[in-house]
Image: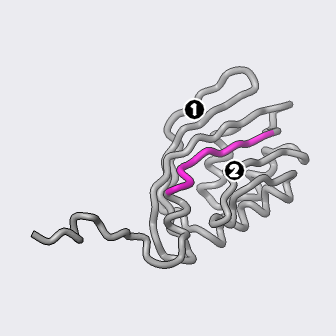
Amino acid sequence: MVIDGYRDYKNGDIQSLLTRYHENAEWSTPESELLPFSGNFHGKSGIAQFFAKLDASVQTIRFEPKQFIAEGDKVVVIGEASWLAKPTGRAYDSSWVHAFTLRDGKVARFEALYDTAASERAFQPGPTAQPSVASELHH
């Protein structure tokens, strides 16, 4: 079921993905003022809102679930992704962990953990490169 949800996402079929969630499912991502798709979302309509914000903000370059770990009602997935921040045109890589809590064959809770620093740098307005100390030294 979780694997099928990733397949739905990769195929751009968010409506099918949403059928795998309870009506009152919780969706949680790290909070960030710079990331439009961050925060907590409630119910299928909130999860749909997350995906709309994600689609408006980033282009997926690479999204790869690497390892699935299941025990009881929990499934943890470890993966890697590469994204393009649409507002700045900057690409970034991010390892991620997704934790699913299942109930009655559907997802009741989803929690994402990822490299918020890399994401925020890509969304930060202005130049991201800091001058190196070595470039300031004169010999």
Circle 1 residues within 10 Å: few <14, some 14–19, many ≥20:
some
Q: Which three-letter amino acid code belongs to the residue tagged 1?
A: Phe
- Residue 112 is inside the magenta segment: yes
**Please, which colouring scheme is shown?**
one colour
Residue for badge 2: 29
The numbered disc on residue 48 is none
Q: Secondary structure at mark 2?
A: loop
Q: Quadrant of residue 31?
A: bottom right
Up the image or down, 97 lies above or below 13; here it is above
Q: Amino acid at mark 2?
A: Thr
Where residue 97 appears, x then y in whole percent? Answer: 58, 40
Q: Quadrant of the C terminus?
A: bottom left
- Residue 75 figure quarter: top right
Q: In x, y percent, where is residue 103?
A: 83, 31
Residue 10 on image: x %, y %: 59, 55
Q: Earlier in the sequence, mark 1 or mark 2?
A: 2
For label 1, the SS is strand
Alpha carbons under labels 1 and 2: distance apart: 19 Å
Q: Quadrant of the N terminus?
A: top right
Residue that protrudes farthest toward the right in the picture? 24
Q: Residue at x 65, y 61 (%)?
A: 12
- The segment highlighted magenta reads 109-117
Q: Write the residue at 68% across / 46% down.
A: 5
Place of residue 60 in the rendered image (x, y in percent of width and height, measured from the top left): 53, 63
Q: Where is mark 1, residue-wise?
A: 68
